[in-house]
Amino acid sequence: MRDGHSFLSVELDGTLREALSGAQHALQAGARQAGLRFEPVPRRYLQLVLDDLGPCPIEALEAVEVAVERAGARHRPCTVQVVGTKQSALPDGRSLVWAAVVDDRDRLGALRADVHGQLTRYAFPVVDGQWAPHVPLGVADAPLPEALLRDHPFGRLPVRRLSLFRRDLADARGPRFRRTWRRALEVEPTADAAADLEAWRAEIAAQLDARLAAHAAALPRTPRRRKRAPRGDVH
């Protein structure tokens, strides 16, 4: 079976997705008036990408799931704000347009770093470097006029769970990304449940460590090209 491109993300709710979809339409119209072309991200894929895993063997997804569960168990749900549109130059001269995310306490950064650490433990070649939370909106064939970009409060983004999306190469309609699973972030356990929860985690962790030992040695170790993170201050 061929490897499918996979990524971890925070999905948007319908209200926020609708607001960002409206921004995409405005960007398309503005780009057309400026003699440029803007290709929007399909509405169903509007989400905050936490980690791009690249081509990923299907047998490695179990390790990804365990990594997310372990990291997610240490982070409580939170809410951040999506506040405006910005753009960053791509190496080929095009421009990536994205919606900025405000996270004053850097909770998403901490969550991503924790997931990175767990993935590294299972030999995934994660991409390090500077990262800012954002929602990709589309790509223009050249930088858009700054007048088309604006600081606008699109809405709240609840961060309650992480989702794994994987490209399905066998779909009759052509390759499409499909959600493989969702995993919730930890909620504060009650005092009565805390001891049982910890014991359950220890038991499951021991079982999974044994099962994943063989998988880690087979994972791809070829370094991936470093991607340029969106630049610009997030306000």
Image (cartoon, rainbow, N blue to C red):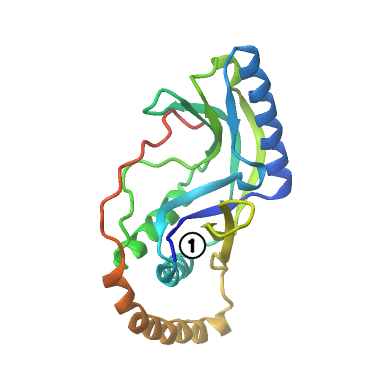
Residue placed furthest toward the top:
34
Identify the residue shown where x is 45% and y is 29%: 233
Residue 44 in percent (x, y) is at: 65, 47
Q: Nearer the viewer, residue 210 or 39?
A: 39
Residue 21 sits in which quadrant? top right
Q: Is residue 27 above or below residue 107?
A: above
- Local SS, label 1: loop
Q: Is residue 141 above or below residue 194?
A: above
Residue 162 in percent (x, y) is at: 54, 59
Residue 17 in percent (x, y) is at: 68, 43
Residue 152 in percent (x, y) is at: 64, 28
* Amino acid beneath label 1: His
User: How many numbered circles are shown?
Assistant: 1
Q: Is residue 18 left or right of residue 48?
A: right
Q: Quadrant of the N terminus?
A: bottom left
Residue tagged 1: 75
Identify the residue shown where x is 26% and y is 59%: 221
Residue 67 sits in which quadrant? bottom left
Q: Is residue 189 above or below residue 111?
A: below
Residue placed furthest toward the front:
172
Identify the residue shown where x is 65% and y is 24%: 28
Identify the residue shown where x is 56% and y is 33%: 138
